[in-house]
Amino acid sequence: MAAAHDIKYLKSLEAVRERSQEVLKRAEEGKLQHFEYDASKVDEVAEYVYSLIMRDYGGIDKVPMHGRWRSYCIKTVGDDGVSRMRDLVSEHVARWREADVGEWESARRIVDLFMVSVLVDAGAGSQWRYQDAEFGTLARTEGLGLAALRMFEAGAFSSSKTNAFQVDAAALEALDDQALLDGFQVSDTNPLLGSANRAQLLRSLGRALRAQTAYFGGMCACQNHPARPGFMLDYLTGRASAPRTVSIDDLWEVVVDGLAAVWPASRTKLDGVSLGDVWQCDTLQPDAADDAAPAQTEPGARSLVPFHKLSQWLTWSLLEVATRLARFTVRGTERLTGLAEYRNGGLFVDMGVLTLVPAARERGTAASGDSTLPPVFAGSDPVVVEWRAMTVALLDLVADRIRRLGSLDESQLPPMFLSRVLEGGTWKAGREMAAKLRSPTNDPPINIVSDGTLF
């Protein structure tokens, strides 16, 4: 019973925030193992982030949601020299509607696209580039997103002879490594971190879609169609407490339970159950002075910290499709957390909130093999786990300070406030700070040995 209780808890949104808050409490007590924490600099970070929000949007209420849709909003300059923003998602939906594709099917198609696009959106590394005939050279998340879109447009993820614009189990299970390497233009001179693992992740997605018919099988009585991510919208309709009104728990269940088989089996397990993006955090290891672990807690589970970064990034992304295109109302979105990834986390390192202790820095620098480069650690390294936990907790602190800088009380917050803070925002601030300090690679201050499934 204890293990079952822990598994349910560690897969929950509440656990992500609560365990990270425990690490922050240790930081405030001076008990971090791998970083020094300077709380006095949190306000400086918040003021910097707020300045970017005001510079680019003029107010937090005007910032769009943080999700995969933003990767498909690309700035172009026309022959007249005027800069314009192209929204590729909206362009596709408009073309489909002109071709008599319904609103619901259009929403399904964008869910299909976003699911594969998010799952391949782990750190690309500083060397990889994507060359596009229409938009030129893109790197990192924008490049990964456009590469996934081009494969989607070409029908690479569809087994249908009549509809290229879908993602289905049959096509994903048949996807080979070379198809993804070709689609993402990977070569010896254009390496993509963890490229083979990304292909395996998509094949695992295909198997998960086929197995989880309750979520992805669709509502059609004929059942002759292959399972698709977009059919989750049909499942959510069945869960609605009022017309197209669901809880964030309903969407989270689809992502965290429906896609549980996607994550590598080598990840942290409890009672034989793979937990996904959950890691041992030595900062939370109990010592003799601590109280005994709660009776319902399995030994060892007390020091596990969940992040579910790709799952939450996917959830943030699907939320926008569900609310904008499928016209759902989703309640309880404030329970989602900030994302424990290298741009958000890098911001706190670059601005001095978190500083690697000398022993950790020496070890990471030795792993990089070059003292001029950022220190390097494996994704499972205790340094990275502590860094990610602090990132989640610090994002909440920054969001609250931004609320106060904008003179907003709780009743005045725009929907999905934290998502706007990330977009407007901490993620952008982390990227701009990296470009300022480490151009032209724009690497984060700490590099991660990526397997293509973590960041």
Image: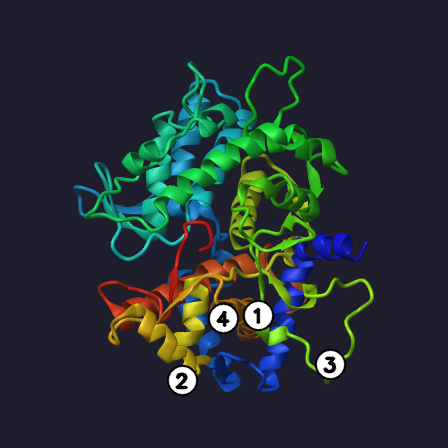
Figure check: 46 above or below 4: below
Q: How many marks?
A: 4
Q: Is residue 313 left or right of residue 194?
A: right
Residue 385 pos. (x, y %):
52, 67
Measuring 56% from the left and 18% from the top, which residue is drawn there? 225
Name the residue type under label 3: Asp
Instruction: Tell me if residue 340 can be seen.
Output: yes
Residue designated by label 4: 387
- Label 3 to label 4, Cα distance in Å? 23 Å
Mark 1 lies on residue: 403
Residue type, label 4: Trp
- Which residue is drawn at the image coordinates 63% and 72% (left, top)? 21
Mark 2 residue type:
Pro
Calculate the distance from the C-alpha at mark 3 to the C-alpha at mark 1.
Answer: 35 Å
| Residue that badge 2 annotates | 358
Secondary structure category for the residue under label 3: loop
Residue, disc 3 = 290
Within 10 angstroms of label 3, few (less than 14), some, or many (20 or more) residues? few
Q: Which of disc 4 and disc 3 is earlier in sequence?
A: 3
- Can you say whether 429 is above or below 6 in the image? below
Residues at marks 2 and 4, CA–CA distance in whole angstroms = 15 Å
